Image: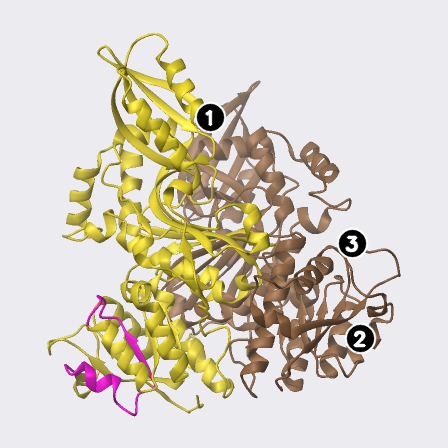
Chain colours: A brown, B yellow
Amino acid sequence: MDAKATLKVGLLGLGTVGIGIAKILLDTQGRHPLLNSLEISQVGVRSHKPRAIDLPETIYTTDLKSIVTDPNIDIVIEVIGGLEPARSLILEAIDHGKHIVTANKAVISRYGEEIYEAATAAGVYVLIEAAVGGGIPVIAPLKQALSVNRIQAVMGIINGTTNYILTRMQTEGGDFEPILTDAQQLGYAEADPTADVDGLDAADKIAILAALAFGGRINRDDVYCEGIRNISAADITYAKNLGFVIKLLAIAKLPNAPAYKAQTSNRIQVRVHPTLVPTSHPLASINGVNNAVLVEGEPIGQVTFSGPGAGEGPTASAVVADLLSIAASLSTGQNPDPLLTCMHDHGLSIVPNSEVVTRLYVRLLVKDTSGVIGKLGTCFGKHDVSLESIVQIGTLKDLVELVVVTHEVPEGAFQNALADIRQFPEVVDVPSLLHVL
Amino acid sequence: MDAKATLKVGLLGLGTVGIGIAKILLDTQGRHPLLNSLEISQVGVRSHKPRAIDLPETIYTTDLKSIVTDPNIDIVIEVIGGLEPARSLILEAIDHGKHIVTANKAVISRYGEEIYEAATAAGVYVLIEAAVGGGIPVIAPLKQALSVNRIQAVMGIINGTTNYILTRMQTEGGDFEPILTDAQQLGYAEADPTADVDGLDAADKIAILAALAFGGRINRDDVYCEGIRNISAADITYAKNLGFVIKLLAIAKLPNAPAYKAQTSNRIQVRVHPTLVPTSHPLASINGVNNAVLVEGEPIGQVTFSGPGAGEGPTASAVVADLLSIAASLSTGQNPDPLLTCMHDHGLSIVPNSEVVTRLYVRLLVKDTSGVIGKLGTCFGKHDVSLESIVQIGTLKDLVELVVVTHEVPEGAFQNALADIRQFPEVVDVPSLLHVL
């Protein structure tokens, strides 16, 4: 790595985020003066067309490969998204000795190991602040300030679309489908909302956070992932009455508190699912498209980072922050900065859901016969599932709606109990089953 | 600056925070491996006595000066607090080429300029993450990731004691004095609570944040500072009815939105006062001893950092995070890292309160005569003070209690109107006047 007066930047992609990045770099007054050492020297685009940014025409190329192989370019920013050609371009840029800044959570969560190994071999940085939480600084604090702690958990609301939908369901009392449709019309949800509402985007991001927080490799395919399509207005109301809001949480944590001390285990929980969050919890008040990430460690306790999780300005801020870190490091000296490089020195295995110890919420529709609550309680007890409450929420003709909330129990034991309960002649339906924080 | 296999650390002070720091450095398993390059080589204490930590007896000295002048020591941690001898020891350590890590907001807010000039001349770092917000990473993000933005405002709840008291007043409906007494008995407030409840501690901290966020020197004595002694249970209730919670906010911001674009002005607002915060605002839900700092910038928007604002573990985490940054920088190369050094290149002047444009809340006790509301409205209007609401809150014998909330108005104009209003024969008392966010 060598210090130079000017660092030449190649920008792959000039969508919303790419334009936001260019705007910052073209107008540095009032920002960190080191940004003046960065110069956009090439911009890779799909086609030539008028742009919402004033860059010299000669800077554009549709030959993205020419950027990642250009010997004059020091840093490549990848903001085209998707798996390919993003992954191949990143790897080729690394092979050509370029530092990488990317917002691509899909590529990093799936090919992070391949990419970081190549980067370490080539002696270049791969920085990814923009991949999780938009503009909120969360990757850098995890690699730097928070890394003096033993991390016990990282969890958060890291998908803006689903948080927007759930917040509206909460405030309006509406159901999922009409609010999704409205969100699509307003531009808060994509035409194909699968990646967001089924939790896949959040799963990419928590896989990245888990790898950083616990310093190991995560197999993205092992991340348990459940979206918000089945959340009903009824569950939101019942949760509210019990003192909870429903949020799509992404959670990575050590299996249980004592284990972190020994650090003997390489097993962690990594999962995404709708979760009943107590209203007093720091994540309960994160509303709309905002994101938040909570980090719990020893001895720091819990710290939370929140703010806009997406959008031109916030995401561009994160990308340029990474550029600034690279520029600072290159101006400092010869050796790679150990707080910017990545340590994924061992594989981490993900605890199967059946072994996860968690609180659970289940809603049951049962025939209104005397003794049914006792029968349920007995069955849960037989499976060592300790209950916090069984509440009769309402009646529906001759049926009764019950909500059961457990204490912390192994999810497998709970599932066994529920399998028995589904066989009860009194049990007509189990409309919902949710995790409780 | 030179890289060494082991960096020797001199620790000034072994109170709660000092012990927390030593605990981390003595037990690095599961933390960033670079911490293994740090070694506590001397600990300066006031007297020899049994300690809650297992360090070799030979490491202790009561001669603090011998630590800051010891040629073997690379980094000095100052956690003795107070102005002297802390300031002199820091300066002498810098003169002897030592890097400094300190949690001392009183010294940095008053002598920051002198200390940073000495540090720049000596080519050493002075890192202060622990001085604001306990363990919450906020100084580093301001100097690094967020510095690519044009900062418009930094504000927060940065004193845990006052937030604890206000939270209890809010939830219990109690008055200030008895809750302060209880907080003192529980250890949440000091025997002499002045620095906390009168806002002095928060003023030290916001002076530091303002200097960092706006890259200039702040005169600590110019920071407007109003504590929470006069907050009554009545005001908390009235505020709640209007959709607010009362928080002690520390605020540093550019005078108004358009000014930041020109960056022509070196004038900023820096102030600490109880504030009515809308319940939907990110700072409204920060309760108990927790702290939070909100940073607003262009193009990032608003991001918030929250967590424990004090205590052994969190503060020690911040101090050791600074040690880690120094270790990383020294391992990287020869030149100082521009993201760790400090830029205070110009003086900033603080806008007088009369020129601050803000919303205000005032409670009035008036005689119950017809037309008094009209008369108040006319008077505010005459002074160009635009009102959001005048609400009759209650009656007290033949008196009526009114609460007035303004739109954003110059505080000077409001004070002029209020001076007139105090002369009205109908106005018996003005029990409270508070800022509104």
CA gap, disc 1 and disc 2: 56 Å
Provide residue B70's location: percent of width, then percent of height. Answer: 26, 90
Chain where mark 2 sits: A
Identify the residue at image location x=59%, y=81%.
Answer: A330
State which region is magenta.
Answer: B61-84
Could you tell me which chain the residue with mark 1 belongs to?
A: B
Q: Which quadrant is the N terminus of chain B positioned in?
A: bottom left
Label 3 crowd (10 A; few <14 / some 14-19 / many >=20): few
Q: Tell me the CA gap for discs 2 and 3.
A: 22 Å
Q: Tell me, yes or no, whether the highlighted magenta stretch contains residue B64.
A: yes
Q: Residue furthest right?
A: A48
Disc 1 to disc 2: CB gap under 8 Å: no
Disc 1 is placed on an element classified as strand
Q: In the rendered image, which residue does mark 3 sit on?
A: A52
Q: Which residue is mark 2?
A: A67
Pick the residue in front: B50 or A324. A324
Q: Is residue A361 magenta?
A: no
Give the image location of residue A425, x and y in percent: 56, 31
How packed is label 1: few (under 14 Cα within 10 Å), some, or many (20 or more)? some
Q: Label 3 is placed on what type of residue?
A: Ala
Q: Amino acid at mark 1?
A: Glu
Quarter of the image for residue B98 reads: bottom left
Residue annotated with mark 1? B388
